[in-house]
Image (cartoon, rainbow, N blue to C red):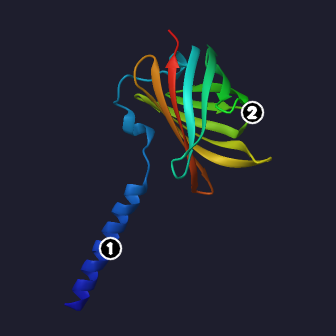
Amino acid sequence: MMHRRKLLLTGISATAGAIGLAGCAGPVVQDYADQKPTLDLKTYFSGIVDAWGMFTDRNGKVVKRFTVEMKCQWTNDQGILDEDFMYSDGKTEKRIWKLTDKGNGSFTGTAGDVVGIALGQAKGNAFNWSYTLALPVDGSVINVQMDDWMYLMNDRVMLNTARMTKLGIHLGDVTLSFMKRA
């Protein structure tokens, strides 16, 4: 009887542990494959796109607010996203993404402050980027990992959220709202 009870408790613990681990797993881009409208990155990021965003620390406090003007163009499977940032404290920043459409919703990208190559996948209305960003902080540079998600709401509006981590520790989040100029 004692052996049976121990097996039952072990089984319950293992099941609860598996459910707990599954609950920690984040979304995958395939989860959005049937969502509409369908995001075509090359169509959306063509022309001028404006964005409004903020960075929040791990406690949810807004640390920075900013706007972005993006000048976007594609030549065949090669794209340029020329981003001009204006922060609420008056500082400015430029990032130029060079994207490659690898087909089947797969993209790669590079930028001056991106370490290595960003990998991205689009399905349905969603796009997910994973990359390492060289982030200037108090006179030095730290490499942080970005899990960046974009969701197309309609032909002009896209929402973006990016989770920033270092060695698996959550540092904060970036939230953006994009609007494609008509």
Position in image of residue 8 (x %, y %): 24, 78
Does residue 78 appear in the picture of this structure? no
Q: Residue at x 34, y 61 (%)?
A: 19
Q: Residue at x 38, y 35 (%)?
A: 32
Position in image of residue 102 (x %, y %): 58, 27
Quadrant placement of the N terminus: bottom left
Question: What residue did someone put label 2 on?
Answer: 112
Task: Please tell me in which quadrant of the rendered image residue 132 appears.
Answer: top right
Position in image of residue 181 (x %, y %): 52, 12
Q: Are marks 1 and 2 in contact (CB under 8 Å)?
A: no
Task: Measure the alpha-carbon separation of dots 1 and 2.
Answer: 48 Å
Question: What residue did someone put label 1 on?
Answer: 13
- Classify mark 1: helix, strand or loop: helix
Query: Outermost residue toward the front?
Result: 89
Please state which amino acid type lies under the numbered disc 1.
Ser
Task: Please tell me in which quadrant of the rendered image residue 29 appears.
Answer: top left
Please state which amino acid type lies under the numbered disc 2.
Gly
Does residue 61 appear in the picture of this structure? yes
- Classify mark 2: helix, strand or loop: loop
Indicate whether 62 appears above or below 108.
Answer: below
